[in-house]
Image (spheres, helix red, strand yellow):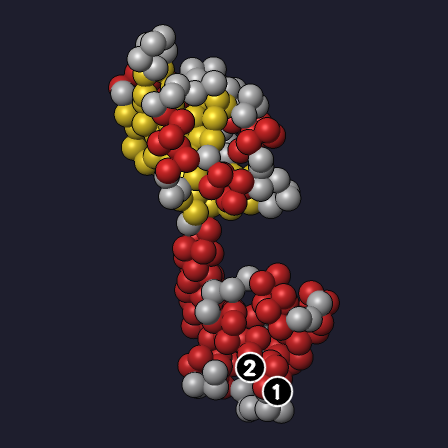
């Protein structure tokens, strides 16, 4: 489905790359797409990019749709600014990508094809989200008349509880922490409950701020 000049470029790219036509139908992709999204080329090529990616931006607003405004702008102006969106993976998960689009015309047919280059930025977005939540927790703590630092210390934290708070402070999500520590999500919740009981905090963010401020992790 791809021209002989374009296909080798896709396979040589170090980023996930796929190509669509004016109607948003996928014409080809490289092996990095499978690594990023889990879709094989046989599942990906021929499908609608809106159906496969289900892209959404800030506040869960849809980016990918049947009549894609991004593709329309790229065809109209010959280029479009790079943008970020969250896309669907084969295992019903989501990941964040930074997307750039290039317009390429097949030399034989002169029909335009739109080359999408995707870079995985999931980790960066997770860290940004964690930092934002920490800032909210700091602002909340400053308004409390009985903030945790005014409360007498409770029982000491166990080494496992300190490890958990250290991983949250590093920006890791609950599922990743449970996997790293080889514990269940329920056990992790129990640890967090015990931590909040000991520190007189209300949630994991307040607990992280409490121990970070005192150098306990």
Image check: 189 left or right of 14? right
Q: Which residue is drawn at 42% across and 62% down?
A: 131
Residue 55: image location, x then y, percent: 50, 34
> Relative to 109, is 89 above or below?
below
Nearest the eye: 127 or 95 = 95
The spot of residue 65 in percent (x, y) is 51, 24
Q: Residue at x 54, y 75 (%)?
A: 165
Camera-side residue of 135 and 97: 97
User: Is 33 or 165 nearer to us in this picture?
Assistant: 33
Vertical comparison of 61 with 76: above or below: below
Q: Which residue lies furthest to the top in this view?
A: 109
- CA distance separating discs 2 and 1: 6 Å
- Judge the density around disc 1: few (<14), some (14-19), many (≥20) Cα neighbours within 10 Å: few
Disc 2 designates what residue? 162
Identify the disc placed on residue 158. Answer: 1
Rendering quarter of residue 8? top left
Do tag 2 and tag 1 residues touch (Cβ < 8 Å)? yes
Q: Residues within 10 Å of mark 2 (few under 14, many from 20)?
A: some
> Can you give x and y, in whole percent of width and height, for residue 158 in the image?
61, 87
- Quadrant of the image occupied by residue 93: top right
Residue 157 visible within the image: yes
């Amino acid at each position: 489905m791809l021209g002989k000049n374009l296909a080798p470029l896709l396979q040589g790219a170090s980023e996930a790359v796929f190509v669509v036509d004016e109607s948003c139908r996928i014409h080809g992709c490289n092996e990095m797409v499978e690594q990023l999204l889990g879709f094989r080329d046989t599942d990906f090529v021929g499908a609608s990019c809106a159906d496969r990616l289900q892209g959404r931006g800030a506040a869960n607003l849809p980016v990918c749709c049947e009549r894609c405004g991004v593709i329309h702008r790229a065809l109209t102006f010959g280029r479009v600014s790079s943008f970020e969106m969250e896309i669907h993976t084969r295992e019903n998960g989501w990941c964040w990508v930074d997307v750039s689009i290039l317009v390429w015309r097949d030399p034989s047919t002169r029909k335009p094809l739109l080359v999408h280059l995707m870079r995985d930025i999931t980790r960066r977005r997770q860290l940004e989200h964690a930092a934002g939540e920490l800032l909210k927790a700091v602002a909340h703590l400053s308004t409390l008349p009985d903030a945790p630092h005014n409360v007498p210390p409770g029982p000491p934290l166990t080494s496992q509880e300190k490890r958990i708070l250290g991983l949250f402070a590093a920006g890791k999500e609950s599922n990743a922490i449970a996997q790293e520590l080889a514990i269940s999500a329920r056990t992790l919740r129990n640890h967090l409950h015990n931590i909040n009981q000991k520190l007189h905090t209300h949630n994991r963010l307040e607990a992280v701020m409490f121990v970070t401020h005192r150098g306990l992790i």
